[in-house]
Image: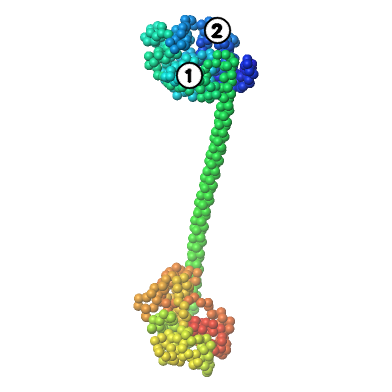
Amino acid sequence: TTTTTSVTSTSITATSTFTTMATSTVSTSTLTLTKSLSVFCFAVARSTGDEPDILRFQLERRTGIFACTDYAVLSTERLSLGGGFEAISFETAQVGVSSDGTAGNSRLFHNAWAAIGKDGRYKQHDFTIKVDPDAILVPSRLGQHLASHIGKKVYFNNCDAFTPALYGAVEVFSKQALQAYFEDDAEDGIHLCRQWEWKPWGEDVFMSNCLKQLGVEAVDDFHLVRDERCKGVSCYDDWAAAFHPFKTLEQWSECWNVTANIEEKREKEQERKKGEADELLLREKVLFEETERNQKLKAAQDAKEAQTLRKADRDKSRAAREEARKSSRERRATEKRRRAAKEEALRRHTAKQQRLRARARGNSSSANESVATRSELQKHKAVQLAAVKRSELQKHQAEQLAAEVTDSTGSEEGITVTEAPWPPPPSPRPANARKALQAALEARLKIGDKVRVRDSSSSRWMPGTVTCLKPLSLKPKGWKVGYAWFEMTVLTQDRLMPGDRAMLAPGRLKKDGSLWPGDIGEVLARRPRLAGAAGGEEALLVRALGDTSAGTPGKEWWYRESALAREQPSLDHRCKAYGCGSLGGVAKGFACDCDVGCIASGSCCEDFLDWCRTSVVPKEK
């Protein structure tokens, strides 16, 4: 037989291969006492018979009582189990027959317990277990029965065949229960149990009655021991911690082999479950670490995105500030150029005035020297004064004409303010002007077009509708029939709306509000009525655009609709390119007035008939 043994302070592990006397059986088993449970086991044995062999078998394999935390063997005679292990000797006593037919050995075991008390090792452990040599103890199963009673003053009833009772094959006592017993049995004790020493009881009956007398609690655990004398024995019970009786070594080893194999399978199953639990724990740990890593990566990514967004916001703010600074620089540059232009114009005007004054002084000096030319000078001054008065009168008349609202009916088709060129352009009219006008208008107009008409004896224009083409007949608004009229123009039907670009109506020669003639503004809003406007005329809010205005960029002003016109391309380049040469006498470079001759000849002004007639002012050479 070969045995490998490992012993620690809290557990004893034995791996054994053995051969019984009757049958050759090979088994490997690991019997480990629970680390949290400390047990002192002992057996009382004879020095002859099968008991010493059974104990030697256990000792060699460190199983049975020898797998407990600590152990001892007691005998009334000298007993050596080998390997230097000697039994503890105690005083013998006469053994009779108890009242229930078993051994009346209470006096004998009183002496054995006295030896245990003198040994004192029971004080170092949670429980002390007395095991008969013919009983098989499985220490690895004790924890499931005893662990919940550690620290309590208890003993265990292990059979309920008749009434709950303590059977002596395997007796379990807590440290506190034995302390109470030994205090009562001491020389100066109260000796409550000695009154029963003479009774013909077995030692188990004596101990149970004694401990009850001492106030020790009895715990019923009827699965702790499988005893033939109680309810039978089965070595295949994997819950019982002890089995009894097995009088021979062959019987004992056979049952022990069964329990060892069961324990081995149980240990493997526990190791398998532990392995699965460890694997599951490892998976959970890996999953947790992966989740934590993903969370950290996501947090880092979110932080990076937030940093990117903050940088983008800073860049956007920086670009906005740069754009604002650039716009401010451009406005300052524009204002600087405007001031420079005004200063240059003022300088030229001043120089011109100085030249005129110098010329006047020279003329005055010549007049003083020659009396003959004095009258001519006076005439010249009179002519200049008349020219100034005539110019002022013409300017006043132009302003009055520009301010006049020509649509007295308040029609929704449109309101056109017409300013007649003054003085009229020097373009001769051909003799067949009326026929040419008739032909040109018939080719351009169609029935239903909106026009305005004026009689030769009146300066008021009236909106109307084309009712017939041959002969050309026009019906003013509110009239029942149409007539042929002295003069007419075509009205535009679209209205200025918010967002459109507009300019002062053609013919306006001075600044009005925020716009100079030729400046461009943006329509911001319309208002149904303008207080004081004739015919309920609508008003437009216009803001001067800085890129075209010579006035104040960004300034807003309310205008009558008749004072504005939609922004249109300049016609000067076409008139300068082609002129109205077919009229005879109008050279290139002069502005077209688009009169009857210009229309009839199909010149450049045909595409801009209405606009040219009301907007083009003759320019100086």
Picture residue at 42% right of the left edge, 8% below the top = 200
**Crowd tier of the residue under label 2, counting other residues whose Cα lies within 10 Å: few below 14, some 14–19, many 20 or above:** some
Above or below, 81 against 619 in this view is: above
Above or below, 585 against 521 in this view is: below
Picture residue at 48% right of the left edge, 76% below the top = 566
Is any part of residue 342 visible from this angle? no
Q: Residue 47: which disc?
A: 2
Q: Residue 307: which disc?
A: none
- Secondary structure of residue under mark 1: loop
Kind of residue at badge 2 = Ser
Picture residue at 55% right of the left edge, 31% below the top = 274
Above or below, 408 against 140 in this view is: below
Q: Residue furthest left?
A: 532
Picture residue at 41% right of the left edge, 83% below the top = 406
Q: Residue furthest bottom?
A: 431
Give the CA separation, mark 1 to mark 2: 28 Å
Q: Earlier in the sequence, mark 1 or mark 2?
A: 2
- Secondary structure of residue under mark 2: loop
Residue 254 is situated, as x and y percent measured from the top left of the image, at 59, 19
Q: Are marks 1 and 2 in contact (CB under 8 Å)?
A: no
Residue 47 is situated, as x and y percent measured from the top left of the image, at 55, 7
Query: Which quarter of the figure is the N terminus placed in?
Result: top right
Residue 52 is situated, as x and y percent measured from the top left of the image, at 56, 10
Residue 202 position by quadrant: top left
- Most foreground residue, 570 or 10: 10
Q: Residue 230: which disc?
A: 1
**Crowd tier of the residue under label 1, counting other residues whose Cα lies within 10 Å: few below 14, some 14–19, many 20 or above:** some
- Most foreground residue, 167 or 411: 167
Is any part of residue 577 visible from this angle? yes
Kind of residue at badge 1 = Cys
